[in-house]
Amino acid sequence: MIPEDFQLVKPGEIRVRFAPSPTGYFHIGTARGALFNYLFAQKNQGSFVLRIEDTDKERSSPEFEKDIIEGLKWLGLDWSEGPDVGGAYGPYRQSERTDTYSDYLEKLLVQDKAYYCFCSEDELEAQRQYQMSIGETPRYSGKCSDLPKETVKKYLEEKKPSIIRFRVHQKKIVFKDLIRGELEFDSGLMGDIVIAKDLLTPLYNFSVVVDDFEMKISHVIRGEDHISNTPKQILMQEALGFNRPEYAHLPLILGPDRSKLSKRHGAVSVVSYKKEGYLAEAIVNFISFLGWNPGDEREIYSLPSLVKEFSLEKVQKGGAVFNIKKLDYLNGFYIRKKSPERLAEMCLPYLEESGLVKKENVDLNYLKSIVSIYHERLKKLSEIVELTDFFFREKLEYEKELLRWKEMTDEELKNSLEKLEKIFSKINSGAWTKVNLENALMPKTEKAGDRGILLWPLRVALSGKKSSAGPFEIAEILGKEKTLERLREAKNLL
Ligand code: GLU
């Protein structure tokens, strides 16, 4: 237990929170929110708190919480307080904080700042319909706001279904958003808001207010979709005598067609980007630009350089467009920065999963040379399977027609393959290098008039593919024996 007067937070200390609801996978938009909070905390030597907002029992699941935590860890957005690591203001999972919420709910009820409402769903719906029909903004009529105490007591004893509403008085709520400037709301349009289903079941707007206060949050940085919640939360802070944190609402993320980003645009779980072979560095770099930019032409930012450059002043108000091509470009860039050894290690799980190699008997040097020839063109690690499978297969499956260059006849094709076999047989295994192979073959291709007559069937015989890396690079890696074997197998197809 922390003593009442214990002051861990120094005046002016920056404390931010990332507060996801585990009601869905950790997707790009959520990750952007986490990143900006993380950067703001790091930049200001503040604390980055992870809070799991699982008050919605039906929609929350441990599976989603796990996905969020896995995604954050993978991106390297480490938190200093959270459900797994604890901290002075825990617990950090809302479902474990029920007692705290009910204390504050009781306080509001006792002070008559909140009241029980017994209106039925049907009744409320009819009211909404009516208000809309006469062109009014739907809001609660206030029917239960002044029920006599005895009536409330009686209804509660009878277990008449009820919820708890917060009394909203008409006033102007003004706050300064660090991104959007001064914002003004009229609380008169809200009506009395539902803050809990009962003493043990608080709703989002209420639990957030309590937690931001109890966890001494100095800055609330979250998506623009929460902007209409902010005035409600401010009213509750005022009613409970809490101080107000600073607010910053991040712009919406839009698809390339400028509609709100959805699955259709590739807004899938961050973990599934990982599975596809995007690197954490690329994702971090990419999402940092979703609404922020350094104000110059630089595009490449590692997490530490983002910490240095980041500021909320450079976050834009307008929607941020999600462009997967940019992500692919960044991913290719970070892949090229890896050493061949590291890249081979990173590609291994993809090859294993496809069943092409077994970890126990993989030759890492062999793998490294294979991966190296695709280092420049790889955009996602998962592409390695499709690009290099022929190195790992005993026998290649392809159509004979693929071997044919232009209008070559079967006879000419056979000649080419025999010629290739003859030329390569003369090269010793010890001298079996790309350069030697090339030097031996290229003069012959010039003589043939059309290089494709020898080079095309060679490449297809070795790879079984319409497009691949160059034939000499492939042959060098396959080695003499395998190269000659594949040339013979090609001939057998004719
Ligand atoms: N739990 C909310 C959400 O996932 C965020 C709450 C907040 O940042 O205030 O949308």
Image (spheres, rainbow, N blue to C red):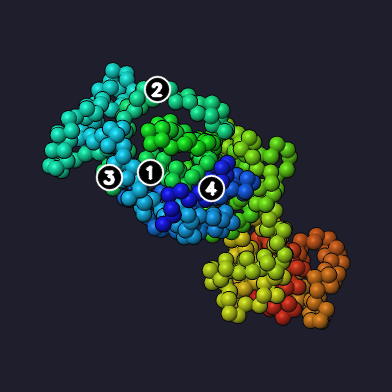
**Percent of width and height locating residue 300:** 70, 48
Residue at x-position 84% and y-position 73%: 436
Q: Is residue 180 left or right of residue 215?
A: right
Residue 105 to residue 426: above or below: above
Sequence-first tag of 4 and 2: 4
Element type where label 2 sits in the image:
loop
Q: Secondary structure at mark 3?
A: loop
What residue would you read off at disc 1?
207
Q: Is residue 8 visible?
A: yes
Q: Which tag, 1 or 2, sits closer to the chain's start?
A: 2
Residue 348 location, quadrant: bottom right
Question: Which residue does the numbered mark 2 point to in the structure image?
Answer: 171
Identify which residue is drawn at 72% across, 80% down. Answer: 481
| Element on which disc 1 rests | helix
For badge 1, the amino acid type reads Ser
Give the class, few, some or many, for how many residues have Cα within 10 Å of label 4's Cα (few <14, many ≥20). some
User: Marks 4 and 2: which is nearer the front?
Assistant: 4
Q: CA distance from mark 4 to mark 3?
A: 30 Å
In terms of sequence position, does the residue under pointer 2 or pointer 3 come before the other? Answer: 2
Q: Residue at x 36, y 22 (%)?
A: 170
Q: CA distance from mark 1 to mark 4?
A: 21 Å
Which disc, if any, is residue 199?
Answer: 3
Mark 3 nearby-residue class (10 Å; few <14, some 14–19, many ≥20): some
